[in-house]
């Protein structure tokens, strides 16, 4: 399978966007393509006409991949699962979504402390009296 | 030694199968009340290694979907997890997929540590509402044990919730609501509905060598800091210090019964050797699936055994907000719940009630993996809209005991040497009505909070944490498996000490009640032996 074809498939799955912090297309996200290439083989093999896929517009590529998804659902799902994991763990993608690229530990995350105002609102709940049934 | 030769151990007074919530609590209570007893626990898995948990790894989200998934079947599919001795469960006939951990601490290792109690009405649904069955004791009989269990686990929260009889002051202040929780609280308040910050078995202040929670997020892949309570951190160190022996990597194959009396257990150790452990009393605490599997595999005859499997059917409603929220961080089971609709109201068209819980949101990859459509520009647009801008409301309903929801053995022998296991569970019409009602209320709250788009998940299959009811307590051997003290009607020196015992399940998480129940059962055994 050509690298061009693999990237065309991945970019159809994960095209990115042009937001204020643009989400890169899969081909520009610096992904490790090793496992993806292997998983893409049966998906690409199910394309009726690979050249036509490469020549097609983005919208037509979506339609062609939908046919493949229907015809080889397990292989397609395996590729998609791996593509999502690889893509959404990629630092440029995580950063584009405004998230931290470091794992959750050891630093954890800040959650705003609750102030007394929040708990004062519970007075209204308390004022209702017993809500449980004996 | 020949491979086929059985290793024989000296007798113990009590052999406990399973080191999870029920087993750990039972062991600790028993040894504190009867220190001369020789108590052994056999655990099929291993101790957690906190130095190498997913939350410290760059690929932590991928691990949460694979080898550290909450589903044993998914872990096995990903190649298995060395610390959780999982066995495959045929769940193809079940609307909900079972979740658990099969190592020291059981499912407290990967639970959310949401720690509500049942309501008093949950103990007498037959008397009050004409459905289900009454428990053989009341909330108030169990209340002192709830208090003891709270103290052992360490609960953060706020006393004074009028949805419950008065509870003692919680040892630690509640977990922070965060922006998402505060917004939910304001909406509940605006609607005039009950809401309260959750009780959680999670440290909000440092206690000993267990840190305060730093809100990292992936509680369900094991807690790196130990802020989240699990029995490997709470009950077990004390039980072991008191002389209880915990043997890991020991898969019990059979409770051996002679003349209607259990004489011990046969197990396979970590080296694959066949072992014989004589015991005067056998306690089984392997959760609603594992316990039923072992009892059935041991030839226990009891019409209700394995039946009445209950899960707490679950649905989600997710609201999207224009402003940024902090959903993907913090302990997953937090921050607030509403029991406005927990008690029965005839006008709703179903008996019993629902629990609404505003939970933290999924991390990025998991949110991205659950979109519809799953790929393409529209999926990425939806993710942009949702990630850090959503609030999820979990709707839990009370499912009632039904004989056809059950655990059975298959004809195959699994890799762990036991018969294979299958579960069957079909959501009842009553439960469907309850979930639909709950989703409508959740949507009402989310709209009041300002959500501009709502997504309903009418059935959430991977929420099968609560494995309950398959060895229920009662007085009639035709309809129950054990007596009020967990002793099998068929073999009285076999005691069940986990959520299998629940005759009914309420509509909220069972961990707190399993712990309280195990304390009570241990006291009953001491009392019976005195």
Image (cartoon, rainbow, N blue to C red):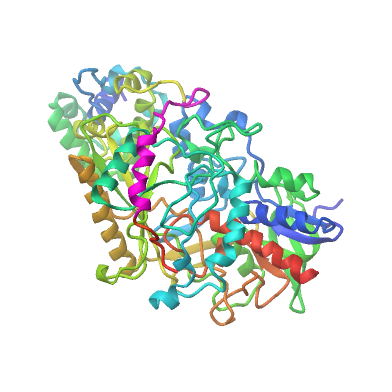
Q: Nearer the viewer, residue B5 or B397?
A: B397
* Residue in the image at 75% along x and 71% along y: B528
* Residue in the image at 73% along x and 45% along y: B238
Q: Is residue B498 visible?
A: no
What stretch of residues is rendered in magenta?
A: A104-127
* Residue in the image at 54% along x and 75% along y: B304
> In which quadrant is the N terminus of chain A drawn?
top left
Tell me residue B316's x, y (percent): 31, 50
B151 shown above or below B514: above
Is residue A8 located in the magenta-colored stretch of the structure?
Answer: no
A64 shown above or below B413: above
Q: Number of callouts in the render?
A: 0
Left or right of residue A26, residue B283 in this image: right
Tell me residue B315's x, y (percent): 33, 53
- The quarter of the picture where residue A19 lies is top left
Tell me residue B199's x, y (percent): 48, 47
Q: Nearer the viewer, residue B529 or B292?
A: B529
> In which quadrant is the C terminus of chain A drawn?
bottom left
Left or right of residue B233, residue B326 in this image: left
Left or right of residue B50, residue A96 in this image: left
């Amino acid at each position: 399978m050509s690298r061009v074809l693999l990237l065309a498939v991945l970019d159809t799955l994960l095209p990115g966007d042009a937001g204020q912090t643009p989400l890169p297309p899969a081909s520009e996200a610096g992904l490790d393509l090793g496992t993806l290439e292997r998983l893409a083989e049966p998906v690409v093999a199910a394309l009726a006409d690979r050249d036509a896929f490469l020549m097609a517009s983005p919208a037509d590529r979506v339609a062609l991949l939908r046919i493949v998804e229907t015809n080889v659902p397990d292989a397609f799902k395996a590729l998609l699962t791996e593509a999502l994991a690889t893509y959404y763990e990629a630092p440029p993608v995580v950063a584009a979504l405004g998230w931290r690229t470091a794992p959750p530990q050891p630093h954890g995350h800040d959650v705003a402390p609750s102030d007394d105002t929040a708990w004062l609102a519970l007075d209204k709940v308390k004022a209702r009296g017993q809500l449980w049934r004996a | 030694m020949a491979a086929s030769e059985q290793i024989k151990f000296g007798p113990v007074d009590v052999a406990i199968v399973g080191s999870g919530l029920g087993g750990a609590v039972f062991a600790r209570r028993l040894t504190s009340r009867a220190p001369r007893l020789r108590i052994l626990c056999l655990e099929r898995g291993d101790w957690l290694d906190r130095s190498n948990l997913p939350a410290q790894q760059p690929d932590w989200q991928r691990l949460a979907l694979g080898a550290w998934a909450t589903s044993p079947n998914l872990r096995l599919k990903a190649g298995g997890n060395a610390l959780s001795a999982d066995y495959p469960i045929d769940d193809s006939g079940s609307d909900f997929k079972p979740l658990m951990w099969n190592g020291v601490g059981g499912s407290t290792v990967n639970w959310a540590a949401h720690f509500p109690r049942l309501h008093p009405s949950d103990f007498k649904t037959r008397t009050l509402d004409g459905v289900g069955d009454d428990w053989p004791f009341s909330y108030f009989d169990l209340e002192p044990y709830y208090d003891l269990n709270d103290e052992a686990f360490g609960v953060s929260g706020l006393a004074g919730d009028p949805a419950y009889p008065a509870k003692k002051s919680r040892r630690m202040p509640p977990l922070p609501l965060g922006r998402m929780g505060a917004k939910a609280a304001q909406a509940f308040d605006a609607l005039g509905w009950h809401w309260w910050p959750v009780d959680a078995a999670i440290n909000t202040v440092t206690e000993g060598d267990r840190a305060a929670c730093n809100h990292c997020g992936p509680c369900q892949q094991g807690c790196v800091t130990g802020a989240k309570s699990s029995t490997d951190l709470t009950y077990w160190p004390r039980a072991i210090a008191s002389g209880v022996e915990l043997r890991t990597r020991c898969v019990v194959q059979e409770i051996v019964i002679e003349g209607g009396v259990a004489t011990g257990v046969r197990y396979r150790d970590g080296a694959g050797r066949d072992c014989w452990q004589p015991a005067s009393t056998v306690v089984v605490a392997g959760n609603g699936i594992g316990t039923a599997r072992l009892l059935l595999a041991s030839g226990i005859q009891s019409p209700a055994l394995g039946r009445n499997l209950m899960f707490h059917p679950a649905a989600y409603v997710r609201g999207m907000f224009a402003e940024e929220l902090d959903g993907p961080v913090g302990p997953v089971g937090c921050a607030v719940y509403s029991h406005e609709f927990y008690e029965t109201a005839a006008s709703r068209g179903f008996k019993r009630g629902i629990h609404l819980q505003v939970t933290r949101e999924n991390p990025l990859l998991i949110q991205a993996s659950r979109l519809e459509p799953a790929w393409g520009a529209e999926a990425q647009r939806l993710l942009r809209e949702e990630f850090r801008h959503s609030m999820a409301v979990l709707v839990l309903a009370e499912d009632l005991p039904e004989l056809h929801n059950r655990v059975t053995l298959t004809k195959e022998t699994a890799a762990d040497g036991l018969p294979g296991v299958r579960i069957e569970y079909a959501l009842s019409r009553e439960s469907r009505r309850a979930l639909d009602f709950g989703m409508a209320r959740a949507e009402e709250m989310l709209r009041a909070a300002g959500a501009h788009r709502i997504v309903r998940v009418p059935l959430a299959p991977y929420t099968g944490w609560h494995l309950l009811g398959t060895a229920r307590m009662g007085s009639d051997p035709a309809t129950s498996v054990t007596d009020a003290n967990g002793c099998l009607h068929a073999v009285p020196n076999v005691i069940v000490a986990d959520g299998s015992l629940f005759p009914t399940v309420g509509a909220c998480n069972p961990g707190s009640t399993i712990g309280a129940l195990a304390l009570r059962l241990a006291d009953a055994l001491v009392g019976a032996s005195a």
